[in-house]
Image (tube, rainbow, N blue to C red):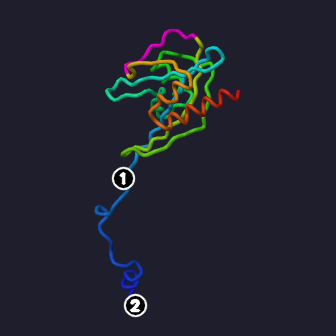
Amino acid sequence: MQPAARRKELLGPPGPPASQTHRPAMVELVHRVKVFVYRYREQAPDYLLLRGAGHESFWGPIQGPIGFGERLDTAIVREVMDDIGVSRPMDVIDLHLPGRWVLGDEEIIEWSYGFRTLPEHQRLRLSERWSAFRWATFNEAYPSLELDTDRATLLRLHSLLHNV
């Protein structure tokens, strides 16, 4: 058998040109932080809930992107400062509940943290992303959260705070 014929036999018939082959779509990886701000009043935690400025908004925690090369702790403090004007946490708790899902051409990885602030902090300065805020006990905050993942994260934070 000729070498060219042997090569064709081993390789099989030629496939479609590279321009016609199906390639998986590229997915952009996006890292975000979700920050549940809390304070203690009368030995029990209150949780900060924010309502987005959009028409179909709901109550939730602070959230935002992590910049390329940015550290998680820096992103947490930046988002809290940008969204409500609080610059320093009394404590930051890693809730060990990363979320991951694909939304269109983005794969989102979300890192959830608790952020303790002073009991009577200065007046909050809301960014224009938010239309309202309120402090709520766990029993008020839990049913107010729209997303199941937010409720699970709040439950985790609340459990950790009660085990301390």
Q: Residues within 10 Å of mark 2 (few under 14, many from 20)?
A: few
The front one of 86 and 19 is 86
Quadrant in the rendering for residue 163: top right
Q: Amino acid at mark 1?
A: Ala
Q: Is residue 123 magenta?
A: yes
Q: Which mark is residue 145?
A: none
The image shows residue 74 at horizontal and vertical percentages of 54, 26
Secondary structure, mark 1, is loop
On residue 25, the disc is 1
Q: Nearer the viewer, residue 18 or 101?
A: 101
Asked if the residue under mark 2 is in contact with the one under mark 1, i.e. CB atoms within 8 Å, the reply is no
Q: Residues within 10 Å of mark 1 (few under 14, many from 20)?
A: few
Q: Position of residue 119 (x, y in %)?
A: 59, 13
Quick one: quadrant of the N terminus?
bottom left
Q: Is residue 74 above or below residue 1?
A: above
Main SS category, magenta section: loop
In front: 150, or 28? 150
Residue at 64% from the left image edge and 14% from the top image edge: 42
Instruction: Give the percent coordinates (x, y) of residue 142.
Output: 52, 29
* Residue ranking furthest to the bottom: 1
Residue 160 drawn in magenta: no
Q: Name the residue: 40% across, 47% down.
A: 27
Q: Which residue is mark 2?
A: 1
- The kind of residue on which mark 2 rests is Met
Quadrant assignment for the C terminus: top right
Q: Is 90 situated left or right of 52 in this image?
A: right
Over which residues does the magenta segment extend? 120-128
Q: Earlier in the sequence, mark 1 or mark 2?
A: 2
At 45% from the left edge and 30% from the top edge, which residue is drawn?
Answer: 64
> Regarding mark 2 in the picture, which secondary structure is present there?
loop
